[in-house]
Structures are given as structure tokens and as C-alpha cells.
Amino acid sequence: MKKLLVALFAITTLLCGCTERQQLKSSLRDALKVAVAHEKAMAEYMLPIEGKLPKSYNGEKIVTAAPRDWTSGFFPGTMWLLYEHTGDEQLKEYADIFTRRLEELKDYTGTHDLGFMVFCSYGNAYRLTGEPYYNSVIEQASKSLVTRFNPTVGCIRSWNTKHKTPELDFMVIIDNMMNLEMLEWCGYHDIARKHADTTTKNHFREDNSTYHVVAYNELTGEVVEKRTRQGAADDSAWARGQSWGLYGYTMMYRMTGEQRYLEQAVKIADYLIPRLPEDAIPNWDFDSDRMLKDSSAGAIMASALIELYGFTKNEAYISTAEHQLRSLCSEEYLASLGENGYFVLKHGVGNLPGNRELDVPLPYGDYYFVEAAMRYLAL
């Protein structure tokens, strides 16, 4: 009798879990329908504004940016993802129009963010259509990006700075991990892996949290300083930075099959999960007393954890991602059509120390939320 009760309890638990996951999938399908409506409305709004992409919404108007802004690729990238999900030809048309607004980036050597800007837009475009034009832009953008690699440091320079002694100010930020996927895809394996390995060595603390910025001596490769630009303090855990690290190393394992990248991703995940709040959407900085949620950090983390679960089958990863997705699908975070400036998610934080984009929608939050939803639905 006891064995029968145990078996019945196990079956009931399994069925409840299946029901909850089916409910989440239903919520995500509904959320993606909302996202489609938002993106189409945004495209109609942006079409007559030549040469610009949506960057945020300040409560009164949509804030736009030029192609060279680091966020420029996320809006067309989101439409490409939604086209993949729906097969909607109008989305494809809009995605192509706004992707082509970024063509000038292929020859731009002034930023490390070309992976964000080009691979989210042109990369998805080429993956879904096979059009040679898109590939030609990706290949040239990768050539531009590798000009920023310094073999002595072993990293791609992030920011251009003007220092009294420039050799002491070769700046590398954790965000830069996200730009390695395009380089791996284009065959720059040595550069991408050297950057990832150097970042593993120098960016992470003993508890597996990450610094935002590491400054190097570009003549010797020595670390000069470890600090923050967007976090609460030099030794704090800026939430989106932690998410970039988690996503970046999970992606590097997918691209390379190298076990060391999977191990690093696992270390980051195991640091983050116990520190998440009740709704699993992190505060903008894990160590700040100023409570301001960053939905973009939650969306990036959820997408990364879903992929990491695929490699590890660790239930903690998928259950955490599910928790995050349920929160992001709720009225607290998911905007209704007609509000939020046609952006999908509310409550993002761009740069709190810089007093920019506080509690606003962000295009990268939308992109990684859509990606996370599609990844979960594909499980």
C-alpha cells in the first residue's frame, strides 16, 4: 500500500509539472502574439524616420538611435526571430528594411559591439533566408571587429579612451563576450577563444561573479585595474553583466564544444540562481540597496539558462528560467499594446550610475525575451 501511495504521489507530481509547463507555453505563445503586434506598430512608427532605430521610451516619446549605437541591431533582430516563429511575411519585410539601415556598420572599426549590432540583425537574416548579401555584411563586419584585438593583452578592446598613458587603459568589459559568436561563426576561432580565456582568467572573482571592467596595460598584457562603469561599486555584481557572462560562456560552449566554457557557464549559473529575488527578475545590481528591477537582465539570463539546461539537464536551470519567464509574461513586466512605446517588456535599467534609461523598456530586453520564449517552446 505504501509503495502504491508513493507511486501515485510521483505520478501526480509529474502531471502537475506537465500542466504547469503547458500553461507556461500557452502564456509564452500569447506573449509572442503581443510581441508581434508591438513590433509591427513600432515598424510603422519608425519607417518615416530615416536612418534611425528605436532605443527606448521615456514615457512621452520613443527615443531613437543612429546605426552606430550599440543597441541598433536588436529591433530588426527581434523581428527576424518573430518572423521565424510566425512565418509572417510582413515581419520579414520590416526586418529586412531595418536591417539594411545598418549596412554602414560593416566597415566600422570604432566599437566592439558589432556582434550585437550585426549578428542579431544580419546574422538572423542570413540564417533564415540564406541571402548572400546578408552574409557579405557579416563577413566584413567580422574583419572590422578583429582589428580591435590585441594579441599581447589577449582581448578585443571594448571602449576607446583618452588616457594620459594609453598603454595603461586598454578597457575590456564583460559585455564583450557576446560579440564572440560572430567571430566564431566567421572562422576567427583563435581570437574568439583567446578573448574568452583571458576573460575567464581576469574578470571573475572567487565566488564566480564578474567585474564589469578590466583595464590592461596594452604593452605588457598586465591587469592595471578592475572596476565598474554601470554597477553599484567596483566590487559589486551588476546584474546585466552577470547575465552577459552566463550567456557568453554558454554560447562559446555551443560554438566550440570546449568543456572549459561549459564549466565556466555552470559556475556563473550556480552563483546567480541562489541570489535571485522572489520573482526571479534581478535587481539592477545584486549588491545595491536601491531597488530597481532590470527585466533585460532577467530575459538574458532566462535565455542562457534554457540553453545551458540543454547541455547539462540540470533541473535547477530550467526551473529558474521558467520562473523568470512566468514573471516576464505577467502584467508587471509584459506591456499591453498601446502602452510602453510599442516595446514588449517594461522595467529595464540601462545605466543607473549614468542616470540613463531608468525603469524603461529596452530593445535588448525584448530581443532576449523573444529568444528565450522561442527556445522554451522548442524544448
Image (cartoon, rainbow, N blue to C red):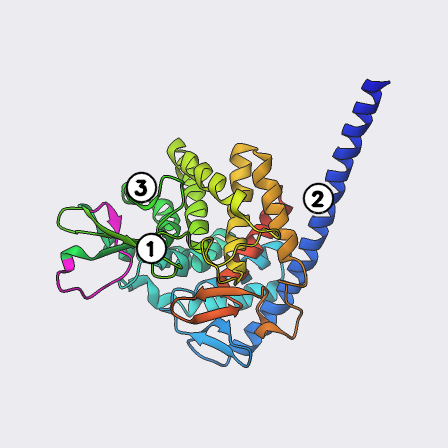
Quarter location, residue 351: bottom left
Quadrant in which the C terminus is drawn: top right
The residue tagged with tag 3: helix, strand or loop? helix
Q: Position of residue 310 (x, y in %)?
A: 55, 37
- Residue that sits furthest to the right in the current view: 1
Q: Position of residue 309 (x, y in %)?
A: 55, 38
Q: Nearer the viewer, mark 3 or mark 2?
A: 2
Whether residue 77 is visible here, answered yes or no, is no
> What's drawn in magenta, residue-wise?
153-166
Q: Is residue 8 left or right of residue 88?
A: right
Q: Residues within 10 Å of mark 1 (few under 14, many from 20)?
A: some
Sequence order check, earlier mark of 1 and 2: 2
Quadrant in which the N terminus is drawn: top right
Front-most of 74 and 223?
223
Circle 3 is placed at which residue position?
189
The residue tagged with tag 1: helix, strand or loop? loop
Q: Position of residue 315 (x, y in %)?
A: 60, 35
Cα distance between the residues tagged 3 and 2: 38 Å
Q: Check contact, mark 3 vs mark 1: CB within 8 A.
A: no
Circle 1 is placed at which residue position?
234
The chief SS type of the magenta part is loop
